[in-house]
Amino acid sequence: MKRIKKLHVKNFKKFADETFEFNDDINILVGDNECGKSSVLEAIELCLNLCHRGRPISAEILGELFNNDCIETYLQGDKSQTSLPELLIETYLDGDPELKGTNNSEGEDTQGISLRMFFNSDLSPYYEPFVASGNILTVPFELYKIEWMSFAWKRLVQLARPVGCLFVDPARLHPTLGRSRYINSIINASVDKYARPTLNLSYRQLKIQFNEKPDVKKINAKLNEGHELTAKSLKIVADITPSGSWDSNLALAADDISFSHIGKGEQNQIQIKVAIQNKAKDADIVMLEEPENHLSHINLIQLVSYIEQKNTGKQIFLTTHSSYVLNKLSINKLCLLAREYVKLKDIDANTVKTLKRLPGYDTLRMVLAQKVILVEGPSDELVLKKIYLGLKGRLPENDGIDIIVVRGIGFKVYLDIAKALKHPVRVVKDNDGNYQKNIVDWRNEDYKDCDFIACFSPDDGAQYSLEPALVAANSNTVAALDKLAKVMLSTQTYDKEYAACTGLAAKRTFMNGWYDTPKKKVDSAIRIFDMFETISYPEYLTRAISFGT
Amino acid sequence: MLLLTYTINNQFELVRHICRLNKVQPHNVAVKGWFSFLLEDMVRPYQRCIVPDRISGIILNSRNPHLCTSRNGKRFNLPRCAEKICGECNPLHYVTKEDNRAHTHYLAKLAATIHEQTGGKPARRLGEIYDEVFIDEMQDLVGWDFAVIRAIVDEGITDLDCVGDFRQAVYQTSETTKKPQTSAEKIAEFKDMGFEIKNLAISWRCIQSICDLADRLHGKDGLYEPTKSLVDIVPPKYADHHGVFAVPISRVEDYIKAYNPVILRWDRRTQKQLCEGRTVYNFGESKGLGFERVLIIPPDRHAKFLSGSTAAFDDASTDDSRNKLYVGITRARFSVAFSHKGGSVISGAEIWNPCD
């Protein structure tokens, strides 16, 4: 089985010089918009298939492939022939020893393919007048050459390419982007080798039959009646030259509706399934771009389990924005494109299993957000937001702070991901009456050396959760507590029950006792969020939401 | 599986053999010429330790490309092409300066040197690709080629089988002084590398008397078993004249008229008049072919041997001349004749002098 172990790109799109290591089975590429997920897939397609999104490489495409900074550096420089930028893509492979050698940028003795695009020095006579003209606005890619070789320095040819890769890209169905050729490649991948000649032969016979049909002949007879148009015989015929092969003229149809007219979601699913099946057996590597596109949640579930079950032995690369896809296909296959490239592999096996069973959790938010606060419940989230709003006049999400309610699976799953990625994260957690045991010891047990995980909780056991802490923060005077109670409690409870308590101590006891049921907690938190009054907040919450400016 | 041989003709012959058995060449059987094998598998994958830029191809040298002759007739090696300069490997020893092509004369040396410098990487790579390597016509390999074979053997990953007949060594992959040169040295080298030597002393082509004559050429070496002919029956068409014949020079034209033999000669300059308009081959060219009747026009050394001298090839620096005669004799199925200036004749040969 042929596998990509590593990809090295230089001056390609947004990457000046970058190396990506991959898993042998599934690679789930995630990252913010514009982080280069698709570029990674494009680099692989270029290097293995020598084409870019299904199109052959031309001078115009070259301009799109080169890194802007390196073009700018060239334009700002002395523009000498040697300063012309060079693009390099190297895939380090496994499974084909003929590709082995040390002719790669690391001098490593390994299998691989390299693609170089650089100035063809044979064409320097053409560069001379170009550079002399002094009016240089871009790199003269027309004078470039492409060198495609194995690490053994053997030239490769497209028809006998050593590693096959299939790029499923729903965007390519766009009517203006060479649709028919793309559909051809889908049709081609969906039938086995021996079916192709049969289809072609039947199609040619069909065309001959057309020409022989009596109705067609009758029309043709009238076409040039009396030879008015030309002395020769003029006919309308089905083109039976070999160039009109079946795959450029036949189309896929689902329930008799042509493929390009069926729903986008269905198109997407069919393409992906055809690629995974790969009856043509010419693909070692399948690349999927955002398989969740156009799919309802239920259809996505079905598609992901299809990918999980039906993929036998192919290496898969997919980009996604869906936590569901990530969790279901195994979160430990995550490849994160952030400021640096990180692979999530050393994650607790139980966490992986939990998320496969409960894939609905927002793990991607956790992975992608720069500033994350994990909280136990919606009340914590609401109060934190209110504090931030009070301080900054805007909600935390506007400043890239993502507050995630951990809900049923608890902190562990999220923190295991953070731990494996060394991703900074803040935790706001109840001490449940014992700060030492539930906060200090809890943190030390699993996350002792993870200084990027910060815990926020009151150290007083009496403030066992959010509400007692709020009460404590507003108990300096009776007036302060009354103000808090007025906000948090419903009018009825305040008037009938709270008002009946006299003295600070009794009022505090009532307040703390009131919040034993979760329902009331959320109601109160919503009231705090909507209030116009100013109350005091527990110090640990203020610290948790304050990111150094 | 990899099949290696020297000449293009032999590569075609191997593919033809495979297709006779299997219709198509299976994807797991590769047939390569010796130079492309050296370049693609033993040199390019790891060439950067000696030659930094990709070697663009090969340049066929008929002799040492670095050897020059000065005006006063002295021969010397170009200093800028020395193997090492200041202790560093010099790429120009192996490739051309202009277009980075590898000299075939030094290609095996380059392969062996790369192998050594990389601690055996080329041979290990080969072992990962192929389970078995066969080398056909191995008698054509010489000098540094054996260092390459030794590299493959030393890695011990690939099964290696070599076939050939040293007595037919007339092409050589390069003119060199590097040992082994002679058949005896080559066999010793194979043995030293741990090869098990198997003799196939049979002939499907020549009748026994022709085998016997051919065997005597290398008899003194003591390396080869007597060849047994498996041709039992001489067809009636050839029965009246079969065996080995010495034809007096004056009767050569008559002999040709009588039997229409294929003429074998040293090179194009030999007996131009006689050869004009007749089927004729140089010894080297005739390799691999077979003819019912053969007439050899022997150069001096061959004539000496055919007159019965056992020392005819003793002062020759290479096996070339002796092997060419061997190839010539063994082309004949039923009769081999040679022109004879007179005097004694090698035993087993009959003087053809019919009084018509």
Image (tube, rainbow, N blue to C red):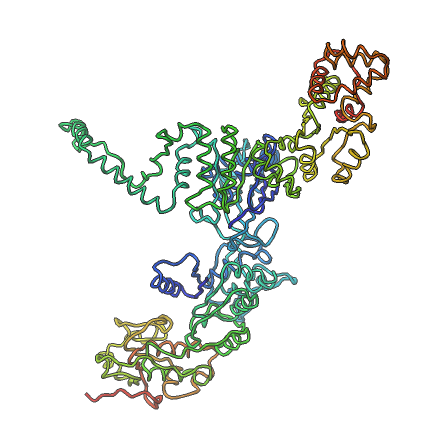
Of residues A251 and A357, which is closer to you in this image? A357
> Residue A251: x percent and y percent?
36, 34
> Residue A420: x percent and y percent?
68, 40
- Where, by quadrant of the figure, is residue A279 drawn? top left
Q: Is residue B209 above or below residue A140?
A: below
The quadrant in which the C terminus of chain B is found is bottom left
Image point (86%, 17%), residue name = A505
Going by the picture, which residue comes out furthest to the bottom? Answer: B344
> Residue B50: x percent and y percent?
59, 58
Going by the picture, which residue comes out furthest to the left? Answer: A226
Of residues B120 and A132, which is closer to you in this image? B120
Of residues A482 and B312, which is closer to you in this image? A482
Image point (52%, 36%), residue name = A304
- Residue A73 visible within the image: yes
Position of residue A202 in the picture relative to residue B146 (left or right)? left
Position of residue A54 in the picture relative to residue A449 (left or right)? left
- Where, by quadrant of the figure, is residue A481 drawn? top right
- Residue A146 visible within the image: no
- Where, by quadrant of the figure, is residue A513 drawn? top right
Q: Is residue A144 above or below residue B283?
A: above
Image point (27%, 40%), residue name = A204
Q: How many marks?
A: 0
> Residue B313: x percent and y percent?
44, 83
